[in-house]
Amino acid sequence: MKERLRTFFLGKRLEDSKLSDEKFNILWGIPVFASDAISSVSYAGEEILLVLIPVLGMASYKSFLPIVAAIIGLLGILVFCYRQTIDAYPQGGGAYIVATDNLGETPGLVAGAALIIGYILTVAVSACAGAAAVTSAFPELLKWKALIALILIALLTWGNLRGLRESAVMFGVPTYLFIFTMLTLIVVGIVRYASGSYTPQETAIAAESSKDMLLFVILRAFASGCTALTGVEAVSNGVPNFKEPAPKNAKKVLYAMAGFVCIVFFGVSVLISMYRIVPNEEATAVSQLAEAVFGSGSALYYVVQVMTVVILTLAANTAFAGLPLLMALMAQDGYLPRQLIYRGTRLNFSNGILFLFASAALLVIAFNGDQHLLLPLYAAGVFLSFLLSQLGMVLHWVRKKGPGWQTKAFVNGFGTIITGITLVIIVLMKFLQGAWVTLVCIILLVWLMRTIKKHYDKVRDDLRISSPEEAVALMGRGRVGKLVLPVQNVNRSFVKVLNCAKDLDFDEIEFYHICSDEASAKQLQAQVERLGVPGTFVYEVTHYRNTEEVLMRHIEAEHAKLDKHQHLTVMMPNLVMQNRWARVLHNQTTKTMIRRMEKYRNVYIFQIPYII
Amino acid sequence: MKERLRTFFLGKRLEDSKLSDEKFNILWGIPVFASDAISSVSYAGEEILLVLIPVLGMASYKSFLPIVAAIIGLLGILVFCYRQTIDAYPQGGGAYIVATDNLGETPGLVAGAALIIGYILTVAVSACAGAAAVTSAFPELLKWKALIALILIALLTWGNLRGLRESAVMFGVPTYLFIFTMLTLIVVGIVRYASGSYTPQETAIAAESSKDMLLFVILRAFASGCTALTGVEAVSNGVPNFKEPAPKNAKKVLYAMAGFVCIVFFGVSVLISMYRIVPNEEATAVSQLAEAVFGSGSALYYVVQVMTVVILTLAANTAFAGLPLLMALMAQDGYLPRQLIYRGTRLNFSNGILFLFASAALLVIAFNGDQHLLLPLYAAGVFLSFLLSQLGMVLHWVRKKGPGWQTKAFVNGFGTIITGITLVIIVLMKFLQGAWVTLVCIILLVWLMRTIKKHYDKVRDDLRISSPEEAVALMGRGRVGKLVLPVQNVNRSFVKVLNCAKDLDFDEIEFYHICSDEASAKQLQAQVERLGVPGTFVYEVTHYRNTEEVLMRHIEAEHAKLDKHQHLTVMMPNLVMQNRWARVLHNQTTKTMIRRMEKYRNVYIFQIPYII
């Protein structure tokens, strides 16, 4: 039944060999790895303006493009740095691997934690931004924004549980369509502006400007805009998924991705600046821009909105592919629960997918679907993983040397400094707005992961046998010992148990009876002895109606008498009702007792079913 | 910990011998057995008026007293009938016993079901009526009425779980105080009325009177008033609790109870009629009467209200004593879950008490604390049990004969006819208002109880061994058979299991391994063989990551090969984490597998704990 429901919702169980190994060429590699980075365009510019406008008013547009340019410059530096990671880690060089490899356990865990949080936020932010694109087009849906985001996440979860693959076509077509749509928007927008057919509304906005605050505001706007760079590291993680020569193809995809991000981000920003777009609660900057360029309600306007939702959904999907894989890797290293290692019926890491669903949904609910509140949490984690990855690369070159290692170390060193400065800016500017939450979560995660590792190590050490000789030596230890056979009356279930007990070679059998008067005990003893199985009959009288307690106390006392290598077996009938409803009519004493006896190291539990 | 909390809330565990056996004389017997019946006075008159007034208006008072007189007449007849029950059943003659004894299983169950429902309604109605007495005095509490009723029920539950006894003083003093208070009310009220110091307000009430409806209305009012007679049978249930000569004392208490009910009910009804009391949503009839007689806000008014709450609480408490005892009796006969038989730590039937709490609380919540909605459900069940009890007594005399049996049979026959007619009136008049619910519940309960009985009989027959010879014969059957030892790798927990297995004399050992490639299986086989325990090594290859499924299928296949008297034992290590939190880091596979294997009749499960 359960199995059939699962098959209906998720499809039938897949064989190991079905694990796909699709390799991407450059053309299809771009959309698969770039959707996350490119999708950032739909919210990054808006975030910058949301910082500038309340302070600088219409003067914001003077600072806007320079900030965008600075961010694109940062992108250029990152591309150069990740080029080198691709060369050094052709087997895939995510921040967790690079940091663990070169900096050690704790930095690796910090990078891993930062990545986990980053992936979760990718899903939450993308879903909320996607919902914002929907509500911009249909303002009457505004109050359902969080719900729309949740539905997007739920659909992605379902798709990924079924085993949605990062197939080239599914990703490629929409990503290229999105790029094409944005390019059309930019070209048409510039033409319309140049032809003078559009006069921007000069909305007078109260500005609380002051010279002293200018630098502060610009830094904060820069920090907000850095969300445009999330997803840039994706290519370096995925080198093994490229066709040969993999590193070469990966690098080309990296350049192309950077190029697209640069063109679309800069182009859209120029337009926003030209058209004096003021983002507000009801309509995103891109939505307002598309309205201004194509006209409100025009078909092309809706195309822009639809493509925005689609690209953001794809971006969220990269997290659904990335996080479960990362968590499986970390679980294999013992830092996360082992349940994350195993692939489910559809060959995906279903537990990781469900974890991502739960945590992203929780964020969306907690922040009521508002991406503006989520974004300050986002950049800090991402840049922390950038920093650790760059620092790791520096040490990699220094240790490994090799031809031209000084230049390479210098490039990554420069990257370390730049990402470090950016991280400091982000943390300082966004600390109270949410960066502190990210940092606290990272610290907690790292502590949790170390605790988990310690536990697994302890279990492994406890269970390990170092040599075949040790195993043989262990075999000699101890005898099976005494059997305790609780008996309340001589019925068929007791006889079934006794039948089993008499065949086995226990050192001694003890019949154990609890009663409220001696006479009935004597009578039972006679009945039991007539069955001809040698053993001692022990009974205890209680006037407190607490049979279970008395038996447990007896087992505890017997257990206390044993030394480390002596054992005791308790054999009990387990009355199983075939009719589930009938179970409420019975006490389930056997179940409770087994649960309570499990804590005794040397008490073995033997249950004999009696099915009725 | 759990034990300590229980001791704190309920007191320490009591020995069997503490089961009190207090015997009552007449003086204290009256309050213990009469509180339920006497408490009905506080709502019965009101119920009659609530039927009459909307139809007859101020003319209601003409019909009011005759109806009260008819009900008191009915009480007289019942007293005569129950006198005879006391004689015939000195060991206690509740409707369930009398009906089962004389009419057979189904009538007995119907009576039992009617009694169960009656007890639950006693608690719900008394608590709501008690809450009504509170809200009459403090109208600002009106919206919390259901909550007040729930609190009363919860306090009673707690008290009874602690093992509140039906002690003479606890019951006696408040009951006599209540009677005394009501007598004072009646005397003062009559004197004030006679002295002319009170002029009733002649509120004009719209009456939709019509001659045709008169009989119908009066019958319906009579049906409502019959709730005054609930609790009358209590004395005949409790004969063994009286001092010797028990039947004689019990009969005296029965007369005294009837006398008090008669005086208080009639007296209060006369006053209500004199003072032209019109009960409404906010104030009960008794509350209005006390206000009119003693003056609003006077100390004596509050005394009446307090005593009303107290007597109703005592009435509810009789159900807390009666229902669990009845259910234990019926559970002993196999008609109710066995858990109801056993006395808890405090020697009370704690499961029955909790059942009563849950069902009464549910009723109060469902009916939002409105006793007017609950009362129509009440009388039908009570009179059904009266009828069956009377009918049973008739057959008792006819069968047993004995001196003067004809007269006795005639008395109970007359009771049968009268209670039968009353029941028909109640059901007809109250059917749509709620009597149908009671009847449906009784039918369902009877069906449920028969089903339960059938189940227990089946279990008993399945387990029973009829003679010592049969037991000995059964002992010879079957051998313990093969041992299946699932193995994933040779670690300490496996060696512990193997150590146990080698000492026991299983017919054959099978090591069973599941893997995804043959090479590792061969390697493991070599390791296992080196341990020197003879057995076959069987492995299965799966590419679907479904170890649990494959093992279960293997067990199922092996089980299918066995004949009725052949067995199979599965021995498994059970990794127990001492740290509860650490358990989430493990799969609990052993637990799941044991749960799934329990359904196989001939599969024995042997678990060896490995504590970490």
Image (tube, coloured by chain):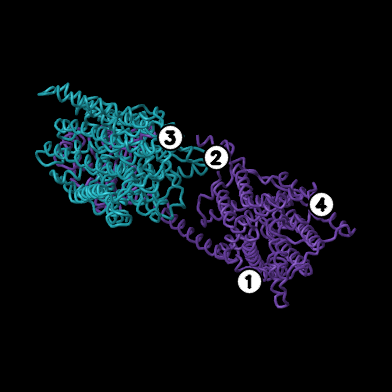
Chain colours: A purple, B cyan
Quadrant location of the N terminus of chain B in the rendered image: bottom left
Q: Is B244 on the left-hand or right-hand side of A291?
A: left
Using the numbered discs, state the Cα–Cα distance from disc 1 to disc 2 in whole angstroms: 50 Å
Q: Is B366 on the left-hand or right-hand side of A169?
A: left
SS label for mark 3: loop
**In the rendered image, residues at marks 4 and 1 fall on the same chain:** yes
- Disc 1 target residue: A428
**Chain bearing mark 2:** B
- Where residue B575 sits: x, y (%)? 40, 49
Q: Determine contact: label 2, label 4, CB under 8 Å.
A: no
Question: Can you tell which of label 3 and label 4 is closer to the viewer?
Answer: 3
Q: Quadrant of residue B425?
A: top left
**Chain bearing mark 4:** A
- Disc 3 target residue: B208
For disc 4, the neighbor class at 10 Å (few under 14, some 14 to 19, many from 20) is few
Using the numbered discs, state the Cα–Cα distance from disc 1 to disc 3 in whole angstroms: 81 Å
SS label for mark 4: loop
- Where residue B308 sits: x, y (%)? 28, 49
- Disc 2 target residue: B544
Q: Nearer the viewer, residue A367 or B169?
A: B169
The amino acid type found where label 4 is placed reads Gly
Query: What's the mark number on residue A295?
Result: 4
For disc 3, the neighbor class at 10 Å (few under 14, some 14 to 19, many from 20) is few
